[in-house]
Image: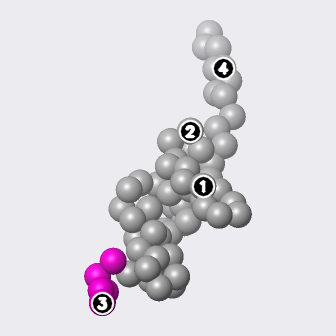
Amino acid sequence: MTTAVELPDVEYVACEMCLKEVPRSEAAVPEATDYVVYFCGLDCYQEWKSQRDKANGQDKGSGP
């Protein structure tokens, strides 16, 4: 006879960039100014940060 094993509930969050769902425990969690955002990895975080910096006029590539 087999016994059913109850798996623990895992909470998933969506990556801010690609919207891929990842377990909350494995998501990168940088805190933005007014809210918390989740990323599936460093690539998505860096893309988000680059877009945010450009929108705020902080593009590192431009100089005086």
- Circle 1 sits in a helix, a strand or a loop, which is it? loop
- How far apart marks 4 and 2 lie (CA) works out to 25 Å
Residue 36 is situated, as x and y percent measured from the top left of the image, at 65, 56
| Outermost residue toward the front in this view | 64
Closer to the chain start, of discs 1 and 2, is: 2
- How far apart marks 4 and 1 lie (CA) works out to 39 Å
Which residue lies under the disc numbered 3?
A: 64
Residue 31's disc number: 1
Mark 3 burial class by Cα count in 10 Å: few <14, some 14-19, many 20+: few
- How far apart marks 1 and 2 lie (CA) works out to 15 Å
Residue 33 is situated, as x and y percent measured from the top left of the image, at 65, 64
The rendered magenta stretch, by its main secondary structure, is classed as loop
Which residue lies under the disc numbered 2?
A: 25
Mark 4 burial class by Cα count in 10 Å: few <14, some 14-19, many 20+: few
Residue 41 is situated, as x and y percent measured from the top left of the image, at 41, 54
Q: Work out whether residue 21 can be spotted.
A: no
Closer to the chain start, of discs 1 and 3, is: 1
Specify the amino acid type for callout 2.
Answer: Ser
Closer to the chain start, of discs 3 and 2, is: 2
- How far apart marks 3 and 2 lie (CA) works out to 42 Å
Which residue lies under the disc numbered 4?
A: 4
Q: Quadrant of the N terminus?
A: top right
- How far apart marks 3 and 4 lie (CA) works out to 66 Å
| Outermost residue toward the top in this view | 1
| Residue 9, quarter of the rendered image | top right
What residue sits 54% from the left and 61% below the top? 15
